[in-house]
Amino acid sequence: MNSNWIDIRAAHGDTFSAHLALPPLGRGPGIVLVQEIWGVNAHIRAVAQQYALAGYVVLAPDIFWRIEPHIELNYDQAGSARAFELYGQVDTALAAADVAATIAHLHAMPELDGKVATLGFCLGGQLAYRGGAEGGADAIVSYYGGGIAEHLDIAASIAQPALFHHGSRDAHITPEQVAAIKAAFAGKSNAQFFDYAEGEHGFNCWGRPAYRQREAALAQGRTLQFLAQHL
């Protein structure tokens, strides 16, 4: 795999880093992959490689760069404690703008051959939703996006295809919040929702106790089908 870190210019002129994973043939449609709160760690880089092997040019921006650049945490007690500290400090509006800047950067890359989607997990699921709307992504994929229910005012403006994955056993995103997200898209044919009966928060991440292989495989298959259809 061809992967490395590149610089992206933020809206106000500073630069931040993003991990780039290129597909085997070097060109393809694009994905802005948005991290969990543990940073662009080994797991997120592996997910980037998964999608690159499926033929996508993948950029995973460092959304904590204003606090501590290149943070990379493990899923143990110490790593999780630091991750939640960072989660409490991040300005999500600026982070969404960084996702939008990453979309713009990907559009300008010569390796791009096609459209661009956002795809994110946890906090990254919220930022894929908000940054995808702000940056004009061609499609949006959100896995258990924490905080989306607090930003439903933008749902009416989302015309691009959107895919939402939620775990029915998610202790962080309540059934009421999931229902509110679905209600915000009621009557709109562009949004798809999948609920996973055995899914907890983080069911896609094999580094966490919440990992569920079957649910992760189902969700990835549905995501790949969605991306192939819309990119």
Image: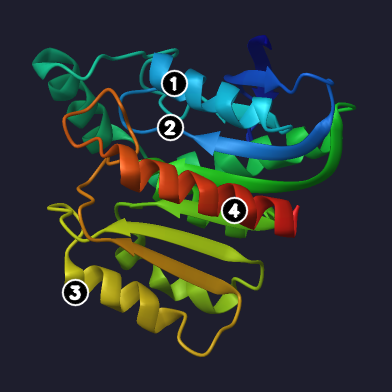
Q: Residue at x 67, y 24 (%)?
A: 8
Q: How far is mark 1 from mark 2, CA to CA?
A: 6 Å
Of helix, strand and loop, which one carries label 1?
Answer: loop
Q: Vertically, is 153 above or below 67?
A: below
Asked if the residues shown at circle 4 and circle 2 are in contact, with their CB atoms under 8 angstroms apart, the answer is no
Q: How far is mark 4 from mark 2, CA to CA?
A: 14 Å
Crowd around label 3: few <14 · some 14–19 · many ≥20 (10 Å):
few
Q: Residue at x 74, y 23 (%)?
A: 23
Asked if the residues shown at circle 1 and circle 3 are in contact, with their CB atoms under 8 angstroms apart, the answer is no
Of helix, strand and loop, which one carries label 3?
Answer: helix
Name the residue tied to disc 4. Answer: 132
Q: Which amino acid does label 1 sit on?
A: Val
Name the residue tied to disc 1. Answer: 40
Q: Residue 176 carries which label?
A: 3
Q: What residue type is labelled 2?
A: Gln
Horizontal and vertical percent position of residue 206: 31, 27
- Colour mapping used in the image: rainbow
